[in-house]
Image (tube, rainbow, N blue to C red):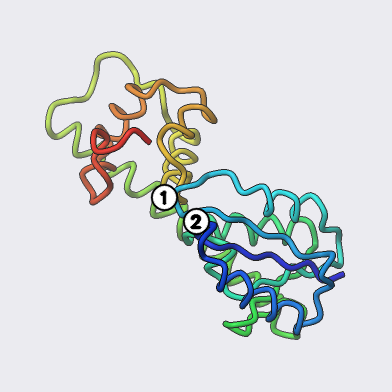
Amino acid sequence: MLVGYMRVSSDSDRQSTDLQRDALLTAGVDARHLFEDHASGAKDDRPGLNKVLELVRPGDVLVVWKLDRLGRSLSSLLTIINTLKDKQVAFRSLTEGMDTTSPSGELLFHVFGALAQYERALIQERVMAGLDAAKRRGRAGGRPPVIVDEKLEAIIAALDGGMSKAAVCRNFGVKRSTLIDTLTRIGWLASGHSNPESHAG
């Protein structure tokens, strides 16, 4: 079964919705199997995508008009692609011509898997570099940090994937002050990310 997913950045972006819908229908997706979200890059919850991931079964194919409709960042895209692979669901992006049902499809999944490992390695490297920098500044010691190891890596990946700080605090059960202190300690905020005081998110 072909399942189509569409996303536009706002409710006013109607033309893009129509363009994606027409392309997916032309590709053979049944209108009853089309799902969409009206969500900006700052939104964490996408009910349409959640329904898709609940619906698809082994052998199905998720079809999107363009890669950026599925993932709003490399981190989020890799997470979704790996979820599909675990479910034995194929993936097709019409604009980029990506199709994991083709002979080269398995190679494409391997490429995405390698990118995911690369992403995790970069996160780990940045965390360790931040900790080393803190030690050189004489900030090591004292009370051990609340957010460490795998939990810290998961939080960094979530933030890089577009999740807001408020959502991270809710989902990972940490206080905002602890989150900000930890991000400052590892140098995440200083590496070009938004100032924690510039918005409430």
Q: Residue at x 35, y 22 (%)?
A: 178
Q: What x and y, as percent, mark residue 66?
A: 58, 74
Tell me if 56 is positioned left or right of 135 in this view. Answer: right
- The kind of secondary structure element at disc 2 is helix
- The kind of secondary structure element at disc 1 is helix
What is the spatial separation of the Cα atoms under label 1 and label 2, in whole angstroms?
A: 7 Å
Which tag, 1 or 2, sits closer to the chain's start? 2
**Image quarter for residue 24?**
bottom right
Q: What x and y, as percent, mark residue 21?
A: 69, 74
Q: Quadrant of the C terminus?
A: top left
User: As shown in the figure, which amino acid type bears the numbered disc 2?
Assistant: Ser
Tell me if 74 is positioned left or right of 83 in this view. Answer: left
Name the residue beneath numbered marker 1: 160
Q: What x and y, as percent, mark residue 162?
A: 45, 49
Name the residue beneath numbered marker 2: 75
Q: Residue at x 81, y 80 (%)?
A: 28
Q: What x and y, as percent, mark residue 95?
A: 59, 82
> In the rendered view, would you say 193 is above or below 119?
above
